[in-house]
Amino acid sequence: MAEYQIEWTHSGLAALAPDPNRRRCHRDPAAPGLYLRVSPSGAKVFYFLYRLGGRGSRLRWLRIAPLGHIQLSRARRVAAKYRALALSRQDPATAGSKPEGGTPISEVAERFLAEHVAKKLKTRTESSYRCFIGTQILPKLGGTPIQSLTREAVCEWHASAVGESGVGGVGANRALSILSSICTQAEKWGLIPQGSNPCRYVRPFSEAPRMRDIQPWELSAVGEAIRRSERESRHTPWALAAIKVIALCAGRVSEVLFMKRGEDMFLDKGYAVIRDHKTSGKVGGKRLELPPAAVEILQNLPQKGDSPWYFAGRGPNAPMSPACLRTAWNRICRAAGVQNLHLHDFRSFAASEGLEQGIDARTTAKLLGHSNSQTTEKHYLRVREKMFAKAAAKISSAIVKAFGLDADED
């Protein structure tokens, strides 16, 4: 049933490859009764195996927590506690499933993911939540009973997140927001009193907005790098086509990558209908305008086998992943000598270019898929330096004329 030749460290277990044909159970040689179950899908969960009687009694599996939601060292401590209860003929499933002081945050987080996130949020959002919970929250706070979590402890954890994990202030703020959501759900479930969320009034780190406008020379350099890559076949045609279409239509990466052939695509009219997007839960499907150049790229893009996706991924029926596209894009930028440029920056470029060419903010907001033009103005519009110079000259023209400063009169 068990295999022993594995590295029993947290990183070693995380790197353990699953068997695609069957579930495997690995026994911890350092903690009697502790096992790691690895399913064919790759899910890894700690279990405690025990009996309440002699050899004739049945074996019982008690789930502890998934790997990533709990550290190996804590799983071993939990297993030791369960074993002590089992040896005293107490069932750990009922007598010792919760530590003194209440319900551990790791258990509340697991319930939060299963009952709230998985049912109400998008799959990509769920994946992000799981990552933050597993890497930022549980390593430090997973074993703390949620009833004992104080605002001081949250402040200390939040302040240390940047220096120790290297996620930066933005990442620490996201982890704080998720922890606050977990505590809010704990209030609703009656685990902690109403209004006692310890994350309330914890001051987040300041977040400076990203101020990045694409310069003309960068556009030219990226364009040349793409053409060179096409000549040398450095990337798949689908990756390069995706980069071009994202830049042309200023769409979100996920919106473009998930385009399906013959489904909500109106290439003859120059647009696509995106059903699943960032705010689809509020506004439903949205229209993504496709300039003529983008339409031509999509029409001439070869189909990969029987894949229904315009930008096919490695799997037989899966779109290209954002991670794969990001790898191709980073290589293009390195070849072009361009630094710190994201594909998402083309949305800011579209807003700033539209402003310079006299397109009103409301129209630009519709093009970007924003229901409120204030979102466009706050996060995407960048007033370029040459526009300041033109505005200053235009505003001062009456004074120049009145004061006789016009160059024509010299």
Image (cartoon, grey):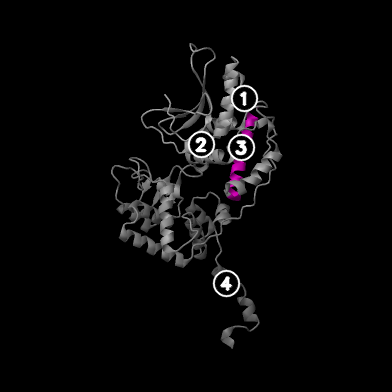
User: CA–CA distance between discs 4 and 3?
Assistant: 47 Å
Is there a contact, CB below 8 Å, between mark 4 and mark 1?
A: no
Is there a contact, CB below 8 Å, between mark 4 and mark 3?
A: no
Which-is-in-front pick, marks 1 and 2?
2
Residue for badge 1:
98
Residue for badge 4:
389
At label 1, the amino acid type is Lys
Give the quarter of the figure containing the N terminus: top left
Residue for badge 2:
9
User: CA–CA distance between discs 4 and 1?
Assistant: 66 Å
Q: Main secondary structure of the magenta part?
A: helix
Which-is-in-front pick, marks 4 and 3?
3
Q: What is the residue that sits farthest to the bottom in this orientation? A: 410
Report crowding for label 1: few under 14, some 14 to 19, many 20 or more residues within 10 A (C-alpha): some
Is residue 141 shown to the viewer in this render?
yes
Q: Residue 308 placed where, x, y %?
A: 33, 42
Please give the count of numbered marks on the rendered protein: 4
At label 3, the amino acid type is Ser
User: Of the residues under marks 4 and 3, which one precedes in the sequence?
Assistant: 3
Give the residues in magenta. Answer: 168-190
